[in-house]
Amino acid sequence: TSGNPLLEVKQLCASYGKVQALYDIDLKLERGSIATVIGPNGAGKSTLLNAIMGVLPSQGGIHYRGKAVERTSLEQRVMAGIALVPERRELFSTMTVEDNLLLGGFRRVRLGHAQPMDQLATVFELFPRLKERRTQLSGTLSGGERQMLAIGRAMMAKPDLLMLDEPSLGLAPRIVKEILQIVSELRQTGLAVLLIEQNARAALQVADYGYVLELGQISMQGESEKLANDSQVIQAYLGFG
Ligand code: ATP
């Protein structure tokens, strides 16, 4: 690991009113790597991503490409290259696959690039299924295709940091594998991925590094392989299946 991670979160705290959801979270993510945050329901995983994205207010440090971004707006973070695929995917169901993707390209248009057609071609290469279905209304896609579209739309902005909130939610194991395989290939382009998952087994298989989040605190961390072989992790998160 280098001394200059793409993302470094320091002592991050977040609350909902009087209820604290995150306690002093420290986390690092290197370029071209995948880190996963696993943990039970309600541990604060979505809260963590939303705080990093700037959707939720938080206290503490968020350093991105060596700069403090914790005081910048959501929009500024998007423009800086941070992308979040929320758990609810939030697609425009009455629009076609292609139009949903083009919407995701607005950052590049704003940055003065020409039409984001080159990026569309890249996303279609990544997800050939989306290309086949590009004129189909996104509301008629299968669950797996919708998740691919949500990730593809985020990739249209050419982010450096892609945050995925439970991409496996509601999907068949085979589809989960397919999507995580594609996510793992994205690493080769230098993209860094922060993957939030309840499916700890699948997440640790694809990630380089893992964090366990419990009751708003990081309770364990380490290289994915080590975590996957840790008896406590096995007992709590990998025990079945
Ligand atoms: P899940 O996998 O169920 O989404 P999670 O690990 O992502 O869980 P969060 O959604 O981040 O957990 O929730 C962390 C804690 O904050 C939970 O106790 C939750 O009830 C609480 N919480 C989340 N959103 C809100 C909100 N909008 N208002 C109040 N409390 C909230």
Image: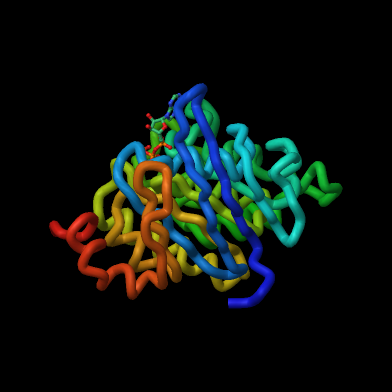
Q: Name the image quarter holding residue 236.
A: bottom left
Q: Tell me which colouring the rendered structure shows.
A: rainbow
Residue displayed at 41% across by 72% down: 223
Residue in the picture at 34% in, 74% down: 225
Q: Quadrant of residue 205?
A: bottom left
For the N terminus, give its image quadrant.
Answer: bottom right
Horizontal arrangement in the rendering, residue 17 relative to residue 103 (left or right): left
Asked whether 155 or 165 is in front, the reply is: 165
| Residue 134 point in image, percent of width and height | 52, 44
Q: How far across and how far down the image is residue 123, in percent?
A: 57, 56
Ligand 1 sits in which quadrant? top left
Left or right: 139 in relation to 228: right
Q: Is residue 113 above or below residue 76?
A: below
Above-or-below relation of 146 to 8: above
Q: Position of residue 206 (x, y in %)?
A: 39, 67
Quarter of the picture containing the C terminus is bottom left
Q: Residue furthest right?
A: 112
Residue drawn 45% across and 54% down?
Answer: 195
